[in-house]
């Protein structure tokens, strides 16, 4: 739990030093963190101006002026069933690393990649149509799996996988 400095400090240091990407936590999967705090980190990494919001771990207003942003990276136990949440949390400007979520596909790596891409496209399309990813995420994935056998197979493999534990980075750490 104690890795020398709070992630907020590390994220700012990376941005100030010209870094281009960092693993920001996922909110879902095995590298889960508190949602509001993770979203605060993501905003500090990407946005030009971030308003003070203690509930998200942002203790003062940050104006990055023209300093380029940092792309948040999500990984760690993520798979196709997490795609609605990942799309909602990270939006379009992120890197989603599906290691086992791709390589664990029963038909091999390429079908695993296809399954993830189909799930992503379905979630982005649904979001752009105004659908509620949090409420309809499973339905969106099931609908897409009807026309993608790769996604249907991935949905079957990952249907029972859950990670349950406490977040490491909290406002009191």
Image (spheres, rainbow, N blue to C red):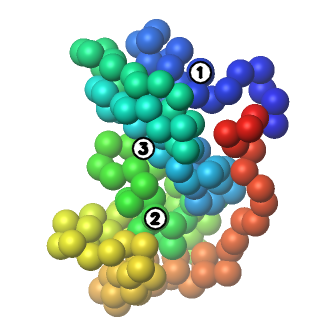
Vertical arrangement, residue 92 with respect to residue 147, above or below: above
23 over 139 or under it: above or below: above
* Picture coordinates of residue 70, whole percent (x, y): 40, 27
Query: Which numbered mark, 2 or 1, is in the foreground of this view?
Result: 1
Mark 3 neighbour class, 10 Å CA radius: few under 14, some 14 to 19, many 20 or more: some
Q: Give the distance between the C-alpha atoms of the residues marked 2 and 1, in whole angstroms.
A: 26 Å
Asked if the residues shown at circle 3 and circle 1 are in contact, with their CB atoms under 8 angstroms apart, the answer is no
Q: Dot 1: few (<14), some (14–19), or many (≥20) neighbours within 10 Å? A: few
Q: Secondary structure at mark 1?
A: helix
The image position of residue 145, as x and y in percent, is: 38, 84
User: In the orientation shown, which residue stands out farthest toward the top?
Assistant: 17
Across and down, in percent, residue 44 comes to 43, 30
- The quadrant in which the C terminus is found is top right
Q: Earlier in the sequence, mark 2 or mark 3?
A: 2
Please identify, in this view, whether the residue under mark 3 or under mark 1 is nearer the observer: 1
Q: Is residue 79 left or right of residue 88?
A: right
Q: Residue at x 63, y 29 (%)?
A: 7
> Which label's residue is closer to the chain start, 3 or 1?
1
Residue 103 in the image: state x and y as whole percent. Answer: 58, 60
Give the residue number, with chain letter if any, for mark 3.
95
Mark 3, secondary structure of its residue: strand
Camera-nearest label, 2 or 3: 2
- Label 2: few (<14), some (14–19) or many (≥20) C-alpha neighbours in 10 Å: some
Question: Mark 2 near mark 3, Cβ–Cβ under 8 Å?
Answer: no
Q: Which residue is mark 2?
A: 85
Residue 9 is labelled as 1
């Amino acid at each position: 739990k104690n890795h020398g400095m709070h992630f907020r400090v590390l994220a700012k240091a990376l941005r100030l030093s010209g870094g281009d990407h960092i693993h920001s936590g996922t909110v879902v999967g095995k590298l889960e963190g508190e949602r509001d705090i993770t979203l605060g980190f993501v905003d500090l990494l990407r946005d030009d101006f971030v308003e003070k919001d203690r509930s998200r771990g942002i203790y003062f207003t940050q104006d990055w002026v023209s300093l380029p942003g940092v792309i948040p990276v999500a990984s760690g136990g993520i798979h196709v069933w997490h795609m609605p949440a990942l799309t909602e949390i990270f939006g379009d400007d992120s890197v989603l690393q599906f290691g086992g979520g791709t390589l664990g596909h029963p038909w091999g790596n390429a079908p695993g990649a296809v399954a993830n891409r189909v799930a992503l496209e379905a979630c982005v399309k649904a979001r752009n149509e105004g659908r509620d990813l949090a409420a309809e995420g499973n339905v969106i994935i099931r609908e897409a799996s009807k026309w993608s056998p790769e996604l249907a197979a991935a949905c079957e493999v990952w249907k029972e996988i859950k990670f349950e534990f406490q977040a490491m980075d909290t406002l009191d750490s």
